[in-house]
Amino acid sequence: QVQLVESGGGVVQPGRSLRLSCAASGFTFSTHYMHWVRQAPGKGLEWVATIWYDGSNQYYADSVRGRFTVSRDNSKNTLYLQLNSLRAEDTAVYYCARVTYSNYDYWGQGTLVTVSS
Amino acid sequence: NFLLTQPHSVSESPGKTVTISCTRSSGSIAGNYVQWYQQRPGSAPTTVIYEDNQRPSGVPDRFSGSIDSSSNSASLTISGLKTEDEADYYCQSYDNNKWVFGGGTKLTVL
């Protein structure tokens, strides 16, 4: 069965960095576009980043462009999100999600990032 | 970029029918597929409708989706409401490599 398992969240000070990982299993990872979506406490869902199946293209929300970097290692079936220059407003649960055509058809359980001094 | 606007909350009684709207601010609602996700507290979202009106396997046919070009909006309709339908619902679409979620609608079944 398809599984997405995020890790790497935690408490970090403003301005510092963090790297999130998402381990995928149960499907052919290298053939799927993957996204990161976040949800601030008590708030709605926000698309963060997209990476193509082969890693050749990445797209970002305006709120994170230039600070966050999405990447993937298809040999390890793993998706990454590098978070730099973190701000308090980046505090959220970060989900990785598989995309099939236009639909987020599988989500991980999420990993919480808290930016606080 | 465009916005998707949903009502903040709706409520209805068990057994009744409720419709949640999702209005696109610019660009055609018919130009890109709309998805709907259900999210219960403490859980990740799950798809209830994809590609405007398709139901994933396992989603009951009480859930249906539609789009209306005249109002540039999408709708999620849930009939025969059950208490288990109480959750947050998000519409989602995309354009030009940007993916957009509506602000979410809290459905209360009371």
Image: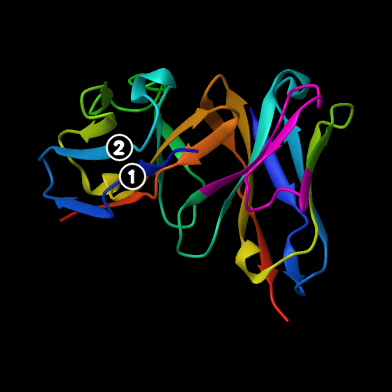
Q: Which residue is mark 2?
A: B23
Which residue, as the protein is rendered here, is positioned at the far right? A75
Q: Report x, y in % for residue A26.
A: 70, 26
**Is A92 placed left or right of B64 in the picture?**
right
Read off the chain for label 2.
Answer: B
Residue at figure coordinates x 77%, y 39% from the top left: A23
Q: Quadrant of residue B82?
A: top left
Tags 1 and 2 touching, CB below 8 Å? yes
Describe the element under mark 2 as helix, strand or loop: strand
Identify the amino acid type marked 1: Thr
CA–CA distance in space, label 1 to label 2? 5 Å
The quarter in which the C terminus of chain A is drawn is bottom right
Q: Report x, y in % for residue B103.
A: 39, 50
Between A95 and B92, the residue placed more toward the observer is B92
Q: Is residue B17 magenta?
A: no
Between A40 and B99, the residue placed more toward the observer is B99
The quarter in which the N terminus of chain A is drawn is top right
Read off the chain for label 1.
Answer: B
**Is B33 placed left or right of A90 in the picture?**
left
- Residue B5 is marked as 1
Between B30 and B41, the residue placed more toward the observer is B30
Q: Report x, y in % for residue A4.
A: 68, 38
Q: How is the image coloured?
A: rainbow
Q: Which residues are magenta?
A: A46-69
**Is A37 placed left or right of B57 in the picture?**
right
Q: Residues within 10 Å of mark 2 (few under 14, many from 20)?
A: many
Identify whether B45 is placed above or below A16: above
